[in-house]
Image (cartoon, rainbow, N blue to C red):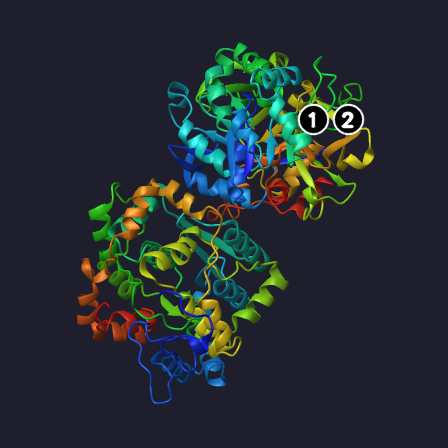
Amino acid sequence: MHRLDPDISRAGVRICSRCIYDERVPSISFDSEGVCNYCRQVERLTAQYGTGAPEGEAHLAQIIEGIRAQGRGRRYDCVIGVSGGTDSSFLVHWAVEQGLRPLAVHYDNTWNTAIATQNIRKVLAGTEVDLHTHVVDNKEADDIFRSFFLAGVAEIEAATDLGYAYTLRRAAAKYGVSAILEGHSFVAEGITPLGRNYFDGKYIQAIHQRFGTRPLRTYPLMTFSRFLKSAIVDRPKFIRPLWYLHYSKEEAQDLLRQRYGWQYYGGHHLENRMTAFYHGIYMPQKFGGDLRNNTLSARVRNGSMDRASAWAEYNSPPTVERQLLEYFLKRLGVSALEFDRVMKEPPRHWSDYPTYKRRFERLRPLFAALAKADLVPMSFYLKYCFPAKAPE
Amino acid sequence: MITIIDYGMGNLGSVVNMLRRVEAECEVTGDPARIASASRILLPGVGAFDAAMERIDAAGIRQVLDDKALHQRVPVLGICLGMQLLTRGSEEGKRPGLGWIPADTRRLPGDLGIKIPHMGWNVAERTRQCPLTERLEGEIRFYFVHSYCVQTDDPRDTVLRTRYGVDFAAAVQRDNIMGAQFHPEKSHRFGMQLLRNFAELPC
Amino acid sequence: MLRTRVIPALLVRDGCLVKTIRFGRFAYVGDPCNTVRIFNELEVDELLVLDISRDRAVRGPDLRLIADLADECFMPLGYGGGVRSLDDARAIFATGVEKVVVNTAAVARPDLIGEIATVYGSQAVIVSIDVKRGLLGAQTVRTGNGRRRTGLDSVAWAKEAARLGAGEILLTSIEREGTWDGFDLDLVHRVADAVTVPVIAHGGAGSLRDISDAVAKGGASAVALGSMVVFQKRGMGVLVNFPDTLSLKGILG
């Protein structure tokens, strides 16, 4: 999305009356009140899950009791994915307060920053929680990143996202844990539209096979069969406490700061250099995309920011770590010339490459049942098992 | 733009690296013509005093440097040996220095039971406000490697003071002539702030 | 005066960061450049990188990798691994490295130490000594990443290295390395007592207490940390970290 006038009254595009998603957001529609379908989805989910209300908390209390019971006699009763960010850090704190015995799990794509590792260290030290890490071989990680870069698609982070998901599942299986807690909050983050952020095992495999040069030995590739085996045989349940609890990122950050000395990374994804590259350079420059409207909209919805300020921030340039581009080029062995050439090539879309998308759609009833049983995340079901809108 | 003087001594790569990290434009040159159009000069140096002064003369840049420093009065920053070269002379050698600040370079005391060279991180105390040392917060520390140190005639020319056996000038500033005895390029956040300050000086 | 130095010691093998236990059992830790960049962000005072790839001694140092690492470092960097000659040292210093670490080559040809020290100064030369106890408990020196016995007594070799011009001794206990069981304080003490150059205790650090013991009881001038800076805790996951300044000040004063 090319940057527009930061003054919301002169934006020149239709903007949701409640948040700041505008008409360029994939699959967006506006109702008679000018409210977008994404806001309505948050409303529906809030009602459905009783978020921040007694029903939600009661339901969650039940779930926790179930986790505690199932975990008795084992070293850990749940697994929590940690990144050093606000949501996962808060979740560890919350879980320990609830009397749970979590194992923190981290997927290290070898592009972490000190803020991320420091935050993880501090929160886990303060809560006395153990950490399990899967580190992928740096050369493999870079081979995959390079493949996606050369493939011209937006999802340069796909391998990290999938690697994370599978690492959580594998850690749960390894330690005999039946519950995976995720820090996702549809209130704080919204449900990202399935536009240019697709990821599945076939997609990653296909792109790597086409553009990669090294075999994948340490990368945790979740193929369809591994996915199903984990969901149906190992059956860890996916719980998203923040879907039930009242949750505000700002309050969470204050608490984390005071209790653990946790540090905010500035909302510019400075906790992982590849994520920072993706948001600060790759998306804006190649795809005209900017996903900051996601969290900014969430803040507008929960009242912690006004629409005008959110729109202004969205339409100002993102901050990037100094020499981030040089670092990217150095790691991936890409010259400045080649970088320019690839960046100028027309963007490709995930549907240009082999994926499991059709299969997910065909098996919707199965995934509906699995989602209902919390064996796959509900957000996965909602995003992947329905036909996506054609690319623009 | 910072013009780094290349006279064949000193590891310029690390300094250039840090300047790039703080996004300060810089060039490396030993060409008198290029130096003549410099707006800011950085004089590096690692090694022996006499050898450095010889090289500067041999490179034919002494004149243009004097002109830039003393007449045109562009901001000049001498680093490590480069700072010692700014003085009248050093106990290490026989040749006179550039003489751009009234100060002498003396041997660090070898008879106090402390190891020479002074090598490692040490604390620097701010002795007066100065644009070169702005925004250095908390306990100010730098990485030092040297066997000789500078003591200025006028205490006000010393802006950062460090103690190692004796008190000496960790950084100096007299008008447009500045110096840092430590290695800013090895002093992470402190070095970066100092170089940033130098890069932002009006010229 | 100068504080006690606490130095992360990173092991590189075939371009990857690894960690060993007793010089064996390699665990994969991450990307060398990114990890050095993290330590830069953490503002550690000094860093050691040792390349333990199998045939470094034959192939010599990987200058491209060293340059990449030096580029990320805005604090003094010491490099070791396959430093065979003055030429190797020269090439390494040219990348911006502050100190070279010599081990196997120095035992094979001790004059190497003086050759490098004469040109670059003793303070730029660290002699690394890996020690394993022999059958009768004697602490003897090993080279070739611990694989070759030399028969040399560790204290005698340390004294000789210092005499020849070593600016510092990096003293590693092979038995303690990667175990979190604490330094071999007896070894540290015997060597620190015998030489006037700084001794960096390495191998076995598991806690802040171990760090202060190395100094207070072992007489070490500095401490190198391995497992402590790359794992969350003993037996748990990879997490690049460094003890915070306050904690270090608390134990080291």
Q: Nearer the viewer, residue B49 or C139?
A: B49
Q: Which quarter shows the N terminus of chain B? A: top right
Q: Residue furthest right?
A: B154
What type is the residue that disc 1 sits on?
Leu
| Element on which disc 1 rests | loop
Name the spot of residue A194 as percent of width and height, x first. Answer: 30, 69
Label 2: how many Cα within 10 Å (few below 14, some 14–19, many 20+):
many
- The residue closer to the viewer here, B51 or A368, is B51
Tell me the crowding category of disc 1: few under 14, some 14 to 19, or many 20 or more residues within 10 angstroms, Cα based. many
Image spot of residue A21 (x, y percent): 38, 75
Question: Where, quadrant-wise, is the C terminus of chain B in this rendering?
Answer: top right
Same-chain status of marks 2 and 1: yes
Q: Quadrant of residue B10?
A: top right
Give how far across and how far down residue C229 sits, in percent.
54, 42
Q: Residue at position x 48%, y 68% from top?
A: A313
Q: Chain of mark 1?
A: B
Q: Residue at x 57, y 45 (%)?
A: C42
Above or below: residue C52 compared with residue A258: above
> How far apart, in angstroms, are the residues tagged by discs 2 and 1?
8 Å
Q: Earlier in the sequence, mark 2 or mark 1?
A: 1
Residue named by callout 1: B86
Whether residue C105 can be seen here = yes
- Side (left or right) of A243 relative to B60: left
Residue bearing mark 2: B103
Left/right placement of residue C82 relative to residue C47 reads: left
**Residue type, numbered disc 2:** Ala
